[in-house]
Image (cartoon, helix red, strand yellow):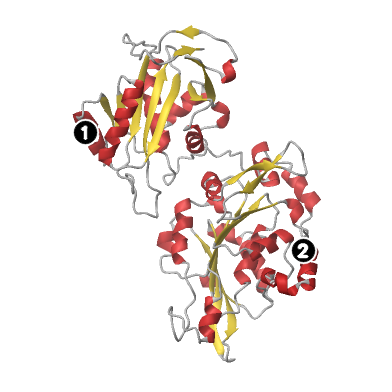
Amino acid sequence: MSLEDLKGLIEKNPNVYDGLRPKWSPYIPHDPTPKQLAYLLLPHREAFYGGAAGGGKSDALLMGALQHVDVPGYAAMILRKTLSDLKQPGALLDRAHSWLSNTDAKWVAGEHTYYFPTTEMDGSPGEPSKITFGYIGQTDAYTRYQGIELQYCAYDELTQHWEDDYLYLFSRLRRNKCPEHGQEPDPKCVNCSRRSGVPIRMRSASNPGGVGHQWVRDRFDIGEAPDPDNPGQVRYVGRHKDRPYIPAYIWDNPFLDQEEYEIGLDQLDPVTRAQLKSGDWGISSDSRFKKSWAKYYSVRGDSIVMGMDGKGEVHTRNKLLRVFGTIDPAASSKEGPGDKDIWRKMPSHTVISIWGLTTDYNLIWLDMVRFRKEIPEILNEVRKSYRSWQPQYFIVEATGLGKGAFQMLQKAGLPVRPVYPHYDKLVRATDAMNRMEQGRIWLPQTAGWKEDCEKELFTWTAHPHQQDDIIDTLAYAAADVSWEASHDERSTVEIYSDDLPTVVR
């Protein structure tokens, strides 16, 4: 439905469509596009807009912020990752200046804030409303915006941000206070009623890509759907009932020279072009582990075929060199080792990975279990893995709070070896990256845990705030075999359970 069609329906059926009228502001200089209108009409607390470049994301966020600037005390904030991002030509701040410079809104440069005059219901001057243009920079949202109170918060280019910064600012959203009754509204007070009518909203917009690509996709459940305009092709749509995602494309923005814009996008590398031109959420170029490096094995009867669907050269080996496990224990079900507080890092998982090592030093990822449980309960999960796979040993991270888990497993009689990991996670994972690039790490073609594994593996950038529990178990496994492989030394002990499959290559 076009914007004109929607306007016509509203004019013909004012009673039915009255609820579809978005709150409007004279500070907004042009009508919204149909996608922007849909975004402004959403009643949800949280919503996401974007996909392809040029879809009108920044305008949509700024329109949303301006909707309620007539209400005394109203406060909104729009964020970019850095101050320079805000100030770039054509970016949010530049756009706000072009919209507001000839109005009665007052710009205070030192605060990066526009103030708007307001009027109380009795005609007296009200407390000014405001829109602040913020940024996270090299710090974090908790440090920079701990004391702020907002009714509208928006992130532009959300995939440039970390999830914990995004989640923290939900705690800064609260109802506007009546100057007489505060947060306890009086139903007879018109000022209370006016302020309580301002919705509490968290809004965001972004293209795919960036360090936050995967968590944003997961949060709004963005997945593939058939493209009705291009049979055999897919588009990416939001599937979360409480967090709507409105995908927008170049052709949704009539204010853009679409032909010229597309010419520019066509000059980009294939990955960036797919993200910005097509809004492709299925492709990411930022991970340290590349999807193109992945090798997959399939299972055929009692054998493992190192190649998809049993295709390729087949060479039978009756036994693996060994089977072993790696464990990255979390401190607890609530917080993981190194967590500063609940906002700075998402709770860690305990991860148990099981590996098969071939005689030519290929690592086969046989199994992976990920969970959040207290340290005493980890023992039961490790025992299950031991009974299932009979590994020769488990390599266990034994530093910090993980030391307790190692000692517990050792006292229980399980074959465990401690590992004291390098502080730099990127250095720690170097052996694993090298081996995967060489095609020496094999993932299952099908497994219940494969999706979680690939999500972390192929979006990990080595940033300290990212989840990396699965990565750690891979790093320990690769480091365990790399020295041996580089010296071409073969183990004289072959440990392999009778009920494990034969390896076929």
Residue 316, numbered circle: none
State whether residue 463 appears in this view.
Answer: yes
**Residue found at x 43% / y 78%:** 183
The residue furthest left is: 411
Where residue 3 sits in the image (x, y, percent)?
Answer: 77, 63
Bin the neighbour count of mark 1 within 10 Å (Cα to Cα): few under 14, some 14-19, many 20 and up: some
**Residue found at x 51% / y 32%:** 289
Residue 100 appears in which quarter of the rendering? bottom right
Q: Estimate the spatial distance between the alpha carbons at disc 2 and disc 1, rounded to whole Å.
A: 66 Å
Secondary structure under the numbered disc 2 in the rendered image = helix
Bin the neighbour count of mark 2 within 10 Å (Cα to Cα): few under 14, some 14-19, many 20 and up: some
In the image, residue 142 above or below residue 210? below
Q: Which residue bears the numbered disc 1?
A: 407
Residue 3, numbered circle: 2
**Residue found at x 62% / y 78%:** 105
Which circle, 2 or 1, is nearer the viewer?
Answer: 2
Where residue 208 sits in the image (x, y, percent)?
Answer: 61, 46
**Residue found at x 36% / y 16%:** 322
Secondary structure under the numbered disc 1 in the rendered image = helix
Task: Identify which amino acid the numbered label 2 is placed on.
Answer: Leu
Where residue 346 sits in the image (x, y, percent)?
Answer: 40, 49
Q: Nearer the viewer, residue 232 or 471?
A: 232
State whether residue 94 appears in this view.
Answer: no
Total labels drawn: 2
